[in-house]
Amino acid sequence: MTAGVKTIIYPVKDIERAKALFTALLETEPYADEPYYVGFKDGGQDVGLDPSGPAKGLTGPVPYWHVDDIRARLAALVAAGAEVQQDVQDVGGGRLIAAVKDGQGNFVGLLQDPPA
């Protein structure tokens, strides 16, 4: 089961320029501002800027589907023909992410928050 797309990560080459653009767009300061990630929250949506995204082959925004069981969803996507681009990884505080590429070359992200 998913809780829908609540996170979108943008691969960026110039994080400072991207941060300025999203600060102007969302009219808010980032809640996370690190050299490796800048994150904004707006209207229940999490918007992230990833300067390592282009090196991972990302050329556009990646939607992250929030799921209850990331390993089961990842296995189901692989069984359906997706190719793992990023295996399950803890990005801090027990938050898990993974990503696949579908048969059309689109990236699909998965995100599992730690239990409450």
Image (cartoon, rainbow, N blue to C red):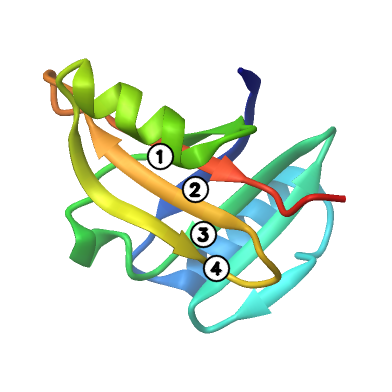
Place residue 84 in its image quadrant: top left
Q: Is residue 24 left or right of residue 9?
A: right
Place residue 74 in its image quadrant: top left
Mark 4 highlights which residue? 91
Q: Position of residue 64 (x, y in %)?
A: 51, 36
Q: Name which residue lies at 67% across and 76% down.
A: 33
Q: Name which residue lies at 22% across and 48% down.
A: 85
Element class at badge 2? strand
First reached walking from the N terminus: tag 1 or tag 4: 1
In this rendering, which labeled residue sits more in front, label 1 or label 4? 4
Identify which residue, 10 or 26, lies in the foreground.
10
Mark 1–mark 3 CB contact (< 8 Å)? no
Element class at badge 4? loop
Element class at badge 1? loop
Q: CA distance from mark 3 to mark 2?
A: 6 Å
- Residue count near mark 4 (Cα–Cα under 10 Å), binned few <14, some 14–19, many ≥20: few
Element class at badge 3? strand
Mark 3 highlights which residue? 49
Mark 1 highlights which residue? 61
